[in-house]
């Protein structure tokens, strides 16, 4: 049995950084990864997809170049092999950077293989037993494989396998109208595929407010994507042209490829959690307290597998919380995290805090203001005026509760709101800030000035 001060299972967006901090402090740590260093973000998530989104945007801008007075001459064509190679290079460079960094740390042992807990202090990997008084789980999640009728009889793509595609599908059917599905739908449409999005629920991105969902739908449809919401239950069958999807109302849609993007499942089912007595909820997420400790002393769960975040920044923040509490003598808590994320369709949606629906449901007196991007100078100048901005505030405390910035640069501009929320300032303070012209952010004080009781 090899003994360590700490064992990390999964090299996602939290574990490697905490392991490195501990190794730098002279501790002996083992980091176990069953596939690729960097986990989902680097290998099958943010990095490759945002690289592909950039290629798709370049295609979209090139197609409308003439409207800007830029004449390219001839049709815009896509070389999917180059597009795919570019995304792969970004992934491989990041993975290699991580490997070199970790290899250079004294006290760090990186092991490859599927790890399982045997009890609260021992882990088995590749037939070897390791032990440590502290174990950190950072095992992430994988695409959910639903049991829709007929799905197991057809070849279909997930958000991971689609990254290997180096051809443009003739007709891509995307099952699931949420964040991951919408990003792929728009990028493949821009690469030249016919694209249909099928969503079981009543609207796209249903976690968002209705007006935001509707504006997202308009953006998606204006790119030439067919959208079927309220699709009910559907079934799949093989047909000569590829695959056909039959919706509850009898509509049949056939395409050459199907992408199933209906959620993520935590990688906790084959981790030996029962052997160690670690509790999970009914969806398989590991239960943690405000300091990311599980119910078993000496075992922590960080990142997507604890169900408190589904993003790289939330996973990294989990690392920061645990490092602060364990190594830095600070008291950081999960409860202090203000939710923020982006949806990377083009233009993107930048989100902070709660939605208007959640604010209304809370029963507190609220104020709301909205502004279409067509009334944002920067968007007009760029010729990209789709979307709108919305701010929600508490009428009593005068603090901002949330923001949805759907429009060009919305993913960046939202940080002005996130920072103000984190600093705990009132919107009256932020209203007197002097933002730079011409930016999207310069409209934030205006939005604040237009807040009205609802
Ligand atoms: C298509 C897509 C796009 C995304 N885009 C964004 C985005 O734009 N912005 C954003 O913030 N987030 C995005 N995400 C989410 C983001 O990638 C994840 O939230 C992030 O990677 C955090 O993951 P993590 O640290 O929890 O673990 P992960 O990164 O998932 O890593 C977990 C690691 O654990 C390993 N592992 C699992 N079980 C074991 C075991 N038993 N033994 C050994 N190793 C094991 C896995 O192989 C994996 O490498 C996207 C995700 C997807 C799928």
Image (cartoon, grey):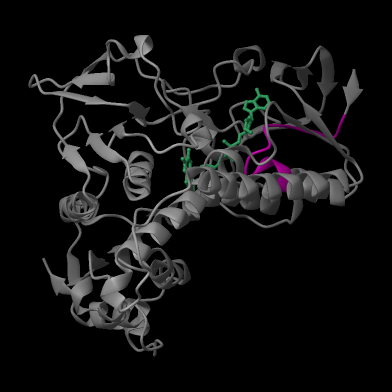
In front: 20, or 451? 20
- Ligand 1, seen in the image, is in the quarter at top right
Q: Position of residue 108 (x, y in %)?
A: 86, 40
- Position of 174 relative to 60 (above/below): above
Q: Quarter-wise, where is residue 246 in the image?
A: top left
Q: Position of residue 423 (x, y in %)?
A: 47, 71
Quarter of the picture containing the N terminus is top right
Q: Residue at the spot x=90%, y=47% of the render?
A: 26
In front: 59, or 311? 59
Is residue 299 left or right of 31 when viewed as pictured?
left
Q: Residue at the spot x=25%, y=49% of the render?
A: 208
Determine if residue 335 is in view.
yes
Q: Position of residue 441 (x, y in %)?
A: 36, 78
Residue numbers of the magenta segment: 4-17
Task: Say if the magenta span includes residue 278.
Answer: no
In front: 290, or 126? 126
- Position of 374 relative to 202 (above/below): below
Quarter of the picture containing the C terminus is bottom left
Q: Position of residue 5 (x, y in %)?
A: 85, 35
Q: Quarter-wise, where is residue 295 in the image?
A: top right
Determine if residue 399 is in view.
no
């Amino acid at each position: 049995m090899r003994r360590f001060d700490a064992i990390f299972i999964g090299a996602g967006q939290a574990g490697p950084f905490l392991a490195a901090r501990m190794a730098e402090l002279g501790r002996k740590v083992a980091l176990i990864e069953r596939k690729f260093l960097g986990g989902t973000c680097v290998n099958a998530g943010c990095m490759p997809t945002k690289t592909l989104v950039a290629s798709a945007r370049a295609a979209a801008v090139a197609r409308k170049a003439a409207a800007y007075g830029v004449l390219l001459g001839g049709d815009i064509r896509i070389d999917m092999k180059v597009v795919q190679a570019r995304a792969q290079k970004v992934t491989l460079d990041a993975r290699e950077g991580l490997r070199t960094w970790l290899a250079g740390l004294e006290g760090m042992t990186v092991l490859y293989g599927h790890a399982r807990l045997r009890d609260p202090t021992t882990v088995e990997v590749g037939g070897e037993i390791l032990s440590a008084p502290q174990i950190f789980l950072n095992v992430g999640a994988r695409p959910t494989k639903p049991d829709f009728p007929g799905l197991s009889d057809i070849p279909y793509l997930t958000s991971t396998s689609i990254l290997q595609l180096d051809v443009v599908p003739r007709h891509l059917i995307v099952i699931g109208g949420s964040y991951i599905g919408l990003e792929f739908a728009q990028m493949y449409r821009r690469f030249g595929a016919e694209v249909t999005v099928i969503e079981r629920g009543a609207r796209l991105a249903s976690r968002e407010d209705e007006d935001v969902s509707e504006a997202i739908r308009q953006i998606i449809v204006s790119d030439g994507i067919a959208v079927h919401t309220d699709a009910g239950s559907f079934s799949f069958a093989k047909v000569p042209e590829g695959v056909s999807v039959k919706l509850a109302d009898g509509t049949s849609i056939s395409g050459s490829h199907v992408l199933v993007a209906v959620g993520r499942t935590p990688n906790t089912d084959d981790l030996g959690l029962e052997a160690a007595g670690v509790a999970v909820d009914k969806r398989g997420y590991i239960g943690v307290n405000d300091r990311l400790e599980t119910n078993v002393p000496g075992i922590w769960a960080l990142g997507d597998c604890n169900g408190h975040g589904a993003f790289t920044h939330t996973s990294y923040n989990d690392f920061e919380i645990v490092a602060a509490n364990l190594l830095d003598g600070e008291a950081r808590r999960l409860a202090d995290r203000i939710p923020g994320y982006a949806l990377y369709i083009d233009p993107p949606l930048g989100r902070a805090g709660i939605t208007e629906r959640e604010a209304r449901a809370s029963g507190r007196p609220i104020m709301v203001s909205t502004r279409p991007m067509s009334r944002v100078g920067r968007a007009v100048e760029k010729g990209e005026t789709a979307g709108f901005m919305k701010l929600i505030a508490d009428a009593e405390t005068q603090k901002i509760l949330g923001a949805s910035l759907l429009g060009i640069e919305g993913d960046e501009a939202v940080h002005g709101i996130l920072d103000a929320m984190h600093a705990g300032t009132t919107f009256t303070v932020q209203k007197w800030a002097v933002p730079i012209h011409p930016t999207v952010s310069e409209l934030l004080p205006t939005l604040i000035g237009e807040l009205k009781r609802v």
